[in-house]
Amino acid sequence: MRRVPAVGSLALLTSVFAAACGGSGRPAAREPSPVAASTPAREVQPCARQRPGVGAARVDAGRQSGSLVLAEVSGSEGRRLLAYVTDLDEPTLRTIDVTAGREVSVTRLRGQGEQALVLADGRVAVTLRRDNLVEILEPGARPEEPLSSRCAVEVPTDPVAMATTLDDRALLVTSGYAHKLTTLDSASLARVRTKDLAREPRAVLAADDGRRAFVSHVVGAKLSVVELDDDAVREIDLHQRLGRAGLNQRASKVREGCQGFALAMAIPFSVGVMPPPPVVERPPSAPSPQPAPPKAAPTTPARQGRVFAPFVTVDPGESRRLTSGYGDASSPLAAEVSSVTVIDAAAERAMTRAALTLPRREVKRADCLLPRAAAASGASLFVACLGIDSVLELDARALDPARAEVRRWKVPAGPMGLALDRATRTLIIASQFDRQVTILPLDGPADAGRQLSLSRSPGSSLTPELALGRALFHRTGDPMISSDGRACASCHPDGREDALTWSTPEGPRQTAMLAGRLSDTGPFSWSGSHPTVEDHVAHTFQRLGGAGLPAAQTQALIAYVKQLPVPRFGEHAGQEHRERVARGKELFFDRETACASCHVGGQTTDGARHDVGTRTSAERLDLETPSLRFVGATAPYFHDGRYKTLLEVLDAPDSKMGHTTHLSRADRLSLVAYLETL
Amino acid sequence: MRAGQRLACFAVALSTTTSGAAVAKRALVLSRPPHVRPPPDAPTGRDVSAGVAIDVRRLPELDPPQSLSRAAVRELSGTAPTELKVETTRSGRRETTSITVDSPRPASVFVGERASAGSMFSAASTSIFCEPREPRAPIRWETFAIRADGGADWTVSDGFVDQARCEVKQVSRRRFDVPRLVGLGVPVHAARVPGGVLVFSPHAEQVTGDTTAGALTVVRAPVNRVFIPTQQGESASVLLEVSLGRLDAWLRSAGADALREAPLRVTLALDVSQAVSEAAPTLFVRSKMTMAERPPTPPRASR
């Protein structure tokens, strides 16, 4: 691990400068090599607090990060509630005085902040997603003072979310593209452990037992359970079966899942504050029922609670069926349906197993198809939803709280951050697209919310066209885009892909990554039938049943997609890895292997169609050469998702798409290592 | 009979007579086929939702009797049932006994061994051929009456049909007090029973459900009830669509107040869950009533 001490580090400035100037960000290797966590003598705990006890402190047990997190200052004038808000458009962290309802300071960060977390001693950790850093800030004596940067530590590519453990000793960081969970010592920020996870981990929360962490995944319908003291990682299956009109049927139809961006946790209902008093009417003469003693004591008292995983269940259709669009329109449920899976934290098992439906297909334009943040309190689960720009209060006691909506609030565009102040029962929401913060007293009237705008620094890079494109990309329930509520971001979360293979009129087709792959990669679609992006966008909307966007909006959408942020690989791979990558590169450009005969140029595509031996009775034969950029983290592979890993692609006895069967296993691994750097 | 045995017996009584698959098939036949969808102009409206969660331990425990078996009714004697209207009619050479529960309350009647079991539909009347050589068949009839205090009286009577003599005899009658879950818009009553929870609701048109352990059973009848098994670490969900065509009549006959406004659709969601760390299961019932959109109030003319 490389620790970047206080501002002024030449290395950091160099990297930031390079990034700002359009540096390639494409190093020879993807991951930093583990560097000894020992601290040089002259750097005495550079990340530690300089003035302990000064300034704002953490609220309650807020141990999860978000794009909005709470802090508080207690003084002679009483309690001041603060919110730290990361900024989607600027490398700043905003301090909001929630009590006063105004922005009080702006802290310049070393990069674009993704999520923030207040540590136990009041320091604030911020993930700088594009810079692969976690920056540590220290609050000043007054909230009006910008926070001071203490240090920044390097973590695996694409850091997103954080959490602290129950004892506050460890800071957990998820890295989306690198699919890692990094454990840092929360005092020194020294790296303790890095674990490999399934694709696209996002939200993380530490379990009450202090020994485990739960990690959501944007794709794959799974939740990882990470043992913090050893190397064990388990996965909880979140796939839901479709329960049709009948009882006790083991429905064969399994729905996939996507959009696992958020997690929340509640303590057990029966021992905590969750249930209201029983609402049972009894005749006055009847004796009150005596509660029976518990049938069994909790098996592991330290392991308790329910974890809520808002996501979307997806039916991409039968791969062998040709359909008129993306997915099967004859399915009894829409292609994407919002859900909140409830997980038994002790048993590590999903309690929500079935997507129950009565025999009718409903299009719910107000469905939360892009959940981005969640918080649980008492019997309520609050979920912030992009697309419909709303915050939902769901009944947390339901097995699928998405089916038990209590109320909803419309908020400004882009709600990505959500925090609940339990002391005042106030919900604070950060709407990143509209740069607004909403302060919502839960016990007040529906219109009691206040809104305040985040200031904009001079020279902000976001143009009105890009802002429009971003809003369109995330807009669900828009009949111009789709007939069933899907948005661009439904299949392309964060501009990437959903890891699903959809049934289409041409056969099964895997969703392609958009970020970094749209410029100079035409023609478009797997069959290469659309010469321009505009053609492809129009065609996609048509297949989704959408009416299509006006030309200006289409241009704005394309402009936004073309500048979607891409992961920047770390610089510090070990010597062995570098040698392997170098060998892989040789093989890639080797004439016999012939990878580079089709995957040419910076975007690694020749823009031509080839028959690569994928013929099935239901498919066309020729496929457009796809770009290999970021191919290392876009599994599964091939147009029909037939290969789970890159190694499987190279192991396949296929002589039409390059020649790799003659390679040794070591060479194939080297080739994989090189592909992962593209 | 020990409590454990009674639990098992009742579970059997409520489970299917053959297998889970048979139950599923029957449910499918009885429900509207999945591919039938409302027309494009199906009514839309505003939803009124409510939810109630209960620690299952707080519900009273009932111990309904096991259905009579064919073997048992062979030896039993009984009395003429006062609650049944039994008529014998002749058609050609055959005589038919028509049995109707003579009650203004929602009532169901089942004939046969373990007759109250499973996912099945039964009305308040049935008929059976008189057959001299047929042995006696068990019969069970039930009524459901909502009292003024909101609770309900569920009565379960057992007896037998003597097909040789074309007559029905009553052997036993039990009454159970079932509390109402308040605040759901439509009357929903629930009680704890051995092995699970029994939920009573207005007559359901369609039912779907899933459980991680045990078997859900539903009796889709005027006395509409769902048995949901409870087990530590397990969960179950049931979704019911209340039969709107019969809702008003059902409410009136059950003794409940009529709804102030006729809904376009009433859906009930029943969840029972217990995480392994939780001391008791939670029953969560949610109702969603879709009401017709009110026409916009015309603006008042300015003076």
Image: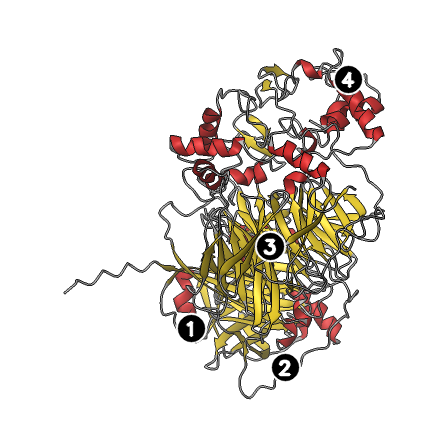
Q: Quadrant of the N terminus of chain A?
A: top right
- Give the residue at the far top of this rendering: A591
Return the residue at label 2. Answer: A289
User: Looking at the rendering, which quadrant does residue B300 occupy?
Assistant: bottom left
Label 2 or label 4, whichever lies nearer to me, is 4
> Are the residues flagged by discs 4 and 3 in contact, CB closer than 8 Å?
no
Q: Residue flagged by tag 4: what amino acid is it?
A: Glu
User: Is A601 left, or right, of A346 in this rendering?
Assistant: left
Instruction: Identify the mark nearer the N-term, 2 or 4.
Output: 2
Q: Are marks 2 and 3 on the same chain?
A: yes
Mark-to-mark CA distance, 1 and 4: 84 Å
Residue A212 in picture, x, y percent from top left: 77, 55
Mark-to-mark CA distance, 2 and 3: 59 Å
The image's mark for residue B253 is 1
> Are the residues flagged by discs 2 and 4 in contact, CB closer than 8 Å?
no
Q: Quadrant of the C terminus of chain A?
A: top right
Residue A159 in picture, x, y percent from top left: 68, 43
